Image (tube, coloured by chain):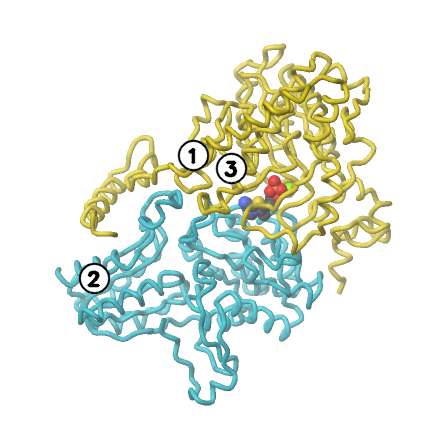
Amino acid sequence: MATPVMNQAADQAAASTRTVTLGKSLNLGLRAAMEADPKVIVMGEDVGKLGGVFRITDGLQKDFGEQRVLDTPLAESGIIGTAVGLAIRGFRPVCEIQFDGFIFPAFDQIVSQVAKLHYRSQGRVTLPMVIRVPFGGGIGAVEHHSESPESYFAHTAGLKVVSCSNAVDAYWMIQQAIRCDDPVLFFEPKRRYYEKGELDVGATPDPLFSSRVLRTGTAATLVSYGPSVKTCLESAAAAAEEGTELEVIDLRALSPMDLTPVFESVRKTGHLVVVSEAPEEASLASEIAARVQQECFYSLEAPVLRVTGFDTPYPPSKLEEDFLPDLDRVLDAVDRSLGW
Amino acid sequence: MSSPEQWTHPEPGVGPAATAATPTAEQVIAGLRATSEGGPELVQLLTPEGERVPDSRWDPYVADITAEDLRGLYRDMVLTRRVDREANALQRQGQLGIWVPLLGQEAAQVGAGRALKPQDMVFPSYREHGVAWCRDVHPTELLGIFRGTDHGSWDPLAKRFHLYTIVIGNQVLNAAGYAMGQRFEGKVGDDDGEATMVFFGDGATSQGDVHEGFVWASVYDAPLVFFCQNNQWAISEPTERQSRLPLYQRARGYGFPGVRVDGNDVLASLAVSRWALDECRHGNGPVLIEAFTYRMDAHTTTDDPTRYRLADELEAWKLKDPIERVRVNLVRHENADHAFFDEVQAEADQLAAELREFCVNMPDPPKERMFAHVYEDGNPVLAAQRDAYLAYASGFEGGGH
Ligand SMILES: Cc1ncc(C[n+]2csc(CCOP(=O)(O)OP(=O)(O)O)c2C)c(N)n1
Ligand SMILES: [Mg+2]
């Protein structure tokens, strides 16, 4: 997997570089944010003593105490609703939703209060809160543990939405999200929690709301975010062996999106395939397709193609390999685009 | 600035915050000990030592239980436990993706399950394998959910046993609505009346859906038994994280009765459940039952309880084992002999073998299943998506996709 480019000389970086998993990197980022600002608090189900079901908050309650890492009662609406109050009071809550499919009890608070309070108060009230959501499939789980609900939130004005795809970004993006004065939905690619990266904590990260070209190519552009970024990189590597150079862009920010690098890429390649696990209808993939056709109409040599989950509920896990975009489906779309 | 301790104070100035897994002395005084010890209001008919304790209020509800019936309850619990252990082992061997153990909760579930009448409806959570057994949902029918081949394979209407619900608390409102329907259709009011029973955990009692279920059921006099299995833990969080007072006492605030029963006592669970269902079928619902029990295994096969609870706790609860006390009682009163216990054991082994055989031979679902039944009336967009995908996938057939 290509490591994102950091603005630091490689040899200098080596000194402070360590190999970490994406999950551990989030843990380190949360810890750094809590050390930097005593108002940062972590709250959620099982985040304290257990350290979260994915151990992302491991050790934080032990080191920061029960006043800053709260094992809350089991109610997502309660978690988000009280975080709003805490944020009004001057805290910076970082809420964990245990799994994607369990964000919906909190949907009302997120859409009605979290998203709108700044607007309703004419900017007098800020809500610097982060809602962490392990999302996406591919882990062989039972129902409600594999969903990709990010479009609902990108669709809602007042919320910022990001997703990290690799261990290095995870460390920086979680801290940047916590420092952001707007509420941020932070989608974590749970099936990539154990993917490793070389983290240099002395590096200077890219801005949070910026996309990034991970691999350059001239034949076609692949745009993705979260868990399917890796799928795209693997697809590009496979295509390269056949002599087709694909450009891969990691969106990182889902709302607002930074599509400038995508437009530039499409003007160069003329072909775009958007890859995402979320169902297709009314999705972020559709949004990207719409904007690209508007900005790059005369550069496009084929319609923008979307490789997504299907418009079904997430299937039983024995069928998830069929549901999730994989290398073959991505390359099939590339072939269709190039053969248009 | 006040500290979080003060925000969660039981009574300002009375004691410390209810944050610890083990209640402090102050919490005991504040009544919190009752959330982890059962307390004086616990209904118990069979002690952990297998002694039948007379109880004038509850005895009438199990007065008809013969030695044969008690042997039947014993058999239900042993088979349920055997299925649970076999499924747990199947997960360990890679045959199931995950398993949700019910170990320790057999008496609560079998007591409730055997109190139900055929006309009653049940809304389970995801751990109710013992109730499923009582509703004639064969253990093999549970496997698909955990193997990842389906989201529930039994007919919930025919079995009057709704599909498992994983989103904590959702089914409580669904059950309230179903029970409202039973009343609206005039199926409440005599011995043949209908009732609904809904299962949820101690953790679930914090969800808005559960509170709303309490409100709806009470406002519409719905024939609904709320059966809360307080197994002391919601994954890593002890019941103290959810409530300042014993859970059964919540009912009072909503205007209906609440009873705490020893969830490891199958006779007590049966008696209290029969009473509660009777109340409901006669139009006196809803009712809350808190079955005080213990999750003896991990939350699921992916959980590691050593991170948050002490082994001592399990050892203490082993002494209150739900099956052992019935066995002791049967032996003491010479209501069962060796042959009986051997027979049940053999039957359990046979059932486990059947479960295993079924599990390892379960076919993977065909690809088209993913697109089926999303709508009753179809959807042309989805149909096109399905056709395109199946055509694409057929290109890989035999190609090692
Ligand atoms: C809405 C929702 N939030 C979170 C979860 C994750 N989760 C699964 S079980 C569980 C704990 C449930 O505890 P309890 O209600 O006591 O039932 P038990 O598992 O002990 O039977 C949690 C938090 C979920 N399934 N649904
Ligand atoms: Mg529980």
Cβ of mark 1 under 8 A from ligand 1: no
Dot 1: chain letter: B
The picture places residue A165, in percent across and down from the top left corner, at 41, 66
Q: Earlier in the sequence, mark 3 or mark 1?
A: 3
Read off the residue under disc 3. Answer: B165
Cβ of mark 2 under 8 A from ligand 1: no
Between marks 3 and 1 in the image, the one whose residue lies nearer the viewer: 1
Mark 3–mark 1 distance (CA, rounded to whole Å): 26 Å
Examine the image and state in which quarter residue B316 appears. top right
Mark 3–mark 2 distance (CA, rounded to whole Å): 40 Å
| Residue B190 vertical position relative to residue B202 in the rendered view, above or below | above
Chain letter for the cyan part: A
Residue B290 shows up from this direction: no
Read off the residue under disc 2. Answer: A334
Chain letter for the yellow part: B
The picture places residue B82, in percent across and down from the top left corner, at 57, 33
The picture places residue A71, in percent across and down from the top left corner, at 66, 55
Give the image quadrant in which the ligand numbered 2 is located.
top right
